[in-house]
Image (cartoon, grey):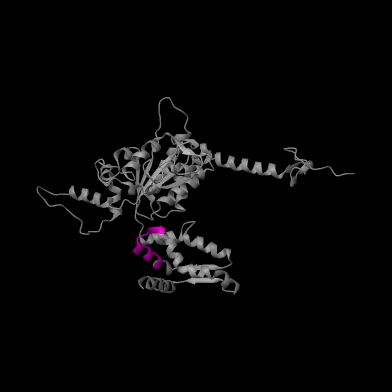
Amino acid sequence: MLEKEPVCSFCGKTKNETKNFVKGIEDAMICENCIKISHTMILNALKTNSSDKFNLTPKEIFNTLEQYVIGQNRAKKVLSVEVREHYKRIHAPVSNYVDMEKSNILMIGPTGCGKTLMLKTIAKILNVPFAIGDATTFTQAGYVGNDVESVLTSLLNASDYNVERAQRGIIFIDEIDKISRKGAGPSLTRDVSGEGVQQALLKMIEGSTCLVPADGSTRKHPNQSTIEFDTTNVLFVFGGSFDGLADIIRKRVSDSSSMGFNSGKIHSKNNVTNVNDYFPLVTTEDLIKFGIIPELLGRIPVRVTLDELNAEELKRVLIEPKNSVIKQYQYSFELDGASLIFENDSFDSIVDRAIKRKVGARGLRSIIYEIIGDSMFYLSDNVKNGIKEFIFNKEKIENIFSEIDNKVKK
């Protein structure tokens, strides 16, 4: 008796039409093509059906951020509340009485203090698309450079060109301080990479329908196919180190600090401006004086300041977070069958080097690589030869730093 030719129970294809089958109970069969289609459908459903994530309370978002971001409690609280409010607005029933407006966010803080990490982590918590844009690459439409809408293309890429999902994503535009205009007054000449970019951002971040190139390019051309992208429900977050802003705030605070008639101004004995002391005092007028146009500030109502990380916080950044740079490298060594060990006294040397370079937490990875770079290069050979444990203490690390610095001086 001839064996019955397998047929897919879903699409009806035979073995001649498709090669592989998976057999279930009662002779049910599914072909590889139907498996691929089912897999794609499930993935899309998981991506779009994430409404349970938006029911997280601000405290639950904050507690998850605590696992990844060290310090910055004030900023984490503000972001937890505002991001939750944003998605609560999106999913709220339509009301005839109240129209909840979008609240974009401005993050002010020194480099390497955790701005990008916080936004990435929140997007991961909520399972929403996330894109980063660099304001320094933007120019006014019609000039050499990227149009401001290019960041929408990045968001589409992050959502696999699922337009509906991308329209509820988060965009982080970094280095917004680098496009400040030349002065507090309107420009008399074209400032296409400064005030011009700020003007171009206005309509997009407030909520409008933009035409985004369908081919993924960063510039629009005539006769180019485009995708309509509604930015009404996109959360825009702007960040920057705002070098010089602390001096503007200090001068304002000092000018307003006087005692009695015709008294002299009160100045701090320390001439070094500490951003941690002054950034929390920032006002709209300070930002306008810095060079951000009032129209843009009016569309970014929520402002949060971040502190410069101190030595103790940088040390915690190395050790505590789930995805700390040391844990990442230790896992990399484990994949090769080796152990990477940093003794407790080694962290102070690493942190001191980061503080001297003024690079914040972002610079820790490059410093760690300076220490273990050679070990990684010879890792496979050493493991084959039975050397599987790599230990770094303060003395060994200081010697590595000395060798590197001596080469630079030469």
Please indicate, yes or no, whether residue 70 appears anywhere in the rendered image: yes
Q: Residue furthest left?
A: 262
Q: Which stretch appears magenta?
A: 349-362
Q: Was residue 162 drawn as part of the magenta stretch in this picture?
A: no
Q: Residue at x 33, y 41 (%)?
A: 196
Where is residue 21? Give x, y as percent.
Answer: 74, 46
Q: Quadrant of residue 203?
A: top left
Q: Residue at x 44, y 42 (%)?
A: 219
Judge left or right: residue 311 versus residue 264. Answer: right
Please state which of residues 123 and 380 is positioned toward the viewer in this rendering.
380
Could you tell me what secondary structure mostly forms the magenta stretch? helix
Above or below for 76 versus 313: above
Judge left or right: residue 131 versus residue 143. Answer: right
Where is residue 173? Give x, y as percent.
Answer: 40, 46
Q: Quadrant of residue 3?
A: top right
Looking at the figure, which quarter contains the C terminus? bottom left
Judge left or right: residue 12 versus residue 343. Answer: right
Q: Residue at x 58, y 42 (%)?
A: 46
Where is residue 281? Give x, y as percent.
Answer: 28, 47
Please state which of residues 114 and 363 is positioned toward the viewer in this rendering.
363
Q: Residue furthest right?
A: 1
Where is residue 255? Give x, y as percent.
Answer: 18, 49
Judge left or right: residue 252 versus residue 77. Answer: left
Q: Quadrant of residue 400?
A: bottom left
